[in-house]
Image (cartoon, helix red, strand yellow):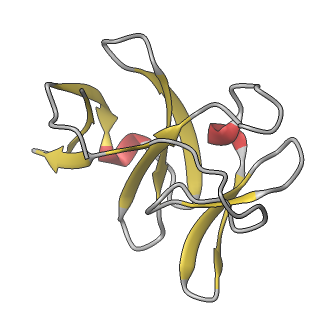
Amino acid sequence: MTAVEVWTPVCALTDLIPGRGAAALLENHEQVAIFRSTGDEVYALSNIDPFSGAAVLSRGIVGDVRGVPVVASPMHKQRFDLRTGACLDAPGVTVAVHPVRVEDGRILVGSP
């Protein structure tokens, strides 16, 4: 993984509804989808659906497939592992994953 150059504060942890996503714009102008699990884990992926090219993953359905936290794209329902960005339905297809940290109740997303 590339070293983090910039940490962008995106919102308070309490701003995210568990089991839902939200879109954010990083300082490098990249769109990310931020997700908060029902167990309070936070994940960040590229917001761009690789199958449609639309910036919609933040609106996807968050769930679990055999212990793997996933988001299903609202376009064609492909499921992406929130930890790795790997598509469970199309081997070899991935979306970018961004490092996330929570400091003083605020979510920060890293970018190179």
Q: Residue at x 40, y 74 (%)?
A: 39
Compared across the picture, whether 18 is left or right of 29 comes to right
Q: Eyeballing the image, is 18 above or below 3?
A: below
Q: As displayed, is residue 102 above or below residue 7?
A: below
Residue occupying the far left of the picture: 104
> Residue 42 location, x and y as percent?
37, 56
Residue 80 appears left or right of 44: right
Pick out the residue farthest to the bottom: 66
**From the viewer's perspective, is 56 left or right of 52?**
left
Q: Is residue 39 above or below residue 73?
A: below
Q: Which of these two is toward me, 91 or 78?
A: 91
Q: Picture coordinates of residue 90 (x, y %)?
A: 77, 61
Left or right: where 72 falls relative to 42: right
Q: Residue furthest right?
A: 76
Residue farthest front in this picture = 92
Identify the image quadrant of residue 62: bottom right
Percent of width and height locating residue 52:
83, 32
The quarter of the rendered structure image containing the C terminus is top left
For the point 47% across and 65% down, the residue is: 37
Measuring 56% from the left and 44% from the top, which residue is drawn there? 95
Where residue 25 sits, quadrant-wise, is top left
Query: Where residue 10 sits: x, y (%)?
Result: 33, 28
Q: Where, by quadrant of the figure, is residue 67 drawn?
A: bottom right
